[in-house]
Every structure is written in C-alpha cells, then in structure tokens.
Amino acid sequence: MSTPKVVVVMGVAGTGKTTIGPLLAARLGVPYAEGDDFHPQANIAKMSAGTPLTDDDRWPWLDAIGSWAHGRAGLGGVVSCSALKRSYRDRLRAEAPGVVFVHLAGDRSLIEDRMSHRQGHFMPTALLDSQFATLQPLQEDEAGVVVDVSGGPQEITERAAKALAELP
C-alpha cells in the first residue's frame, strides 16, 4: 500500500475547491482543511472589499497552509488553496516537499456562473479576472494533475481521485 498523499486542491475562485476538497478527502480517507480558514482577518477584509491580495498578504497564509501540509506528511490530507502562481506552489513545497496538486480548471463563463449563485462567500465575482490573470498553470516538473470542473461534484471528485491514483 502506498503512503497517503497530501493534496492541495488549487484553482481560481469558483472552481469548487471548497466543494471538491472535502469530497476528495472523504474518498481518500484523509482529513480536509479549508484553505480560507488559514487567512488572517485582514486578507478576508481586503477580498471582501474587492481588493486583490498582494504577494506580501499571501506569504503568511501560504506558510500556514504549508505547515499544516507538512504536519500531514506520511499521513495524507487534502487542503484547498488557490495556489495560482508557481512561486506560491514553490512556497508550499518548501514547507511540505511531498505535496501534490489537483488543479481544478474550467471555462471562465462556467466558473463565473457558479460564483454568481453561491451564497455567503467573501470573494466577489469582480475578482475573477484578476484570478485568471494571475493563474500560472502547473508545469511539467510539478507533481499534480489538472481536473476539468464540468459536471457535478461527484463526477469531478472521481475524476480527481482517478488522476491522483495514476500519478507515479
């Protein structure tokens, strides 16, 4: 039996990280951590006001997620984190070298439609353009998979689990 992976479910806002993350964790039999819970209140206030975060805003958040992932090494876990830039993923890997990424990816119009229907989330659809502008897709040398977000949550989760199982 292989060692359980620590998985970072990544992607722009509205791709379903908070929906797919817990489903994937349950499917893999490991704990889930909500990446948004690692944000300091100042970050949430900025995003709620429609102001994109700077890299300086993100570093403590990424370090906190990386620390959680490091603590799950050899045990497995799933955590959501946008991880849009390579430098953000590098920061996570510096803290937790064995993490693998599940990049939830989809058509902008589908994601915007989903965002417009969700209730009580601090991320406004107005920031979607900045999210796509910031996104740097996984590179060939990064451990991870890209999973299409079309379809329902169970279908996406199964697609992600299958893709992860095929990783070396």
Image (tube, helix red, strand yellow):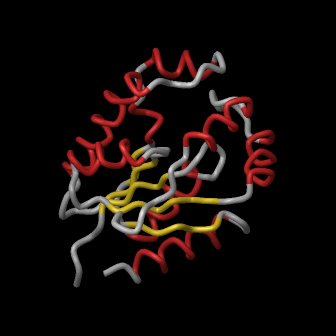
Indicate whether 150 appears above or below 129.
Answer: below
x%, y% of residue 136? 50, 50
Where the C terminus falls, by quadrant? bottom left
x%, y% of residue 2? 23, 80
x%, y% of residue 52? 57, 25
Residue at image location 27% in from the left, 43% down from the top:
66
Residue at image location 55% in from the left, 51% down from the top:
11
Q: Is residue 24 left or right of residue 79?
A: right
Q: Quadrant of residue 29?
A: bottom left
Indicate whether 104 appears above or below 17.
Answer: below
**Foreground residue among 93 and 68:** 93
Q: Is residue 73 left or right of residue 53?
A: left
x%, y% of residue 60? 31, 27
Residue at image location 61% in from the left, 39% down from the top:
131
Residue at image location 33% in from the left, 29% down from the top:
59
Please give the count of numbered marks on the rendered protein: 0
Indicate whether 38 appears above or below 112.
Answer: above
Where the N terminus falls, by quadrant? bottom left
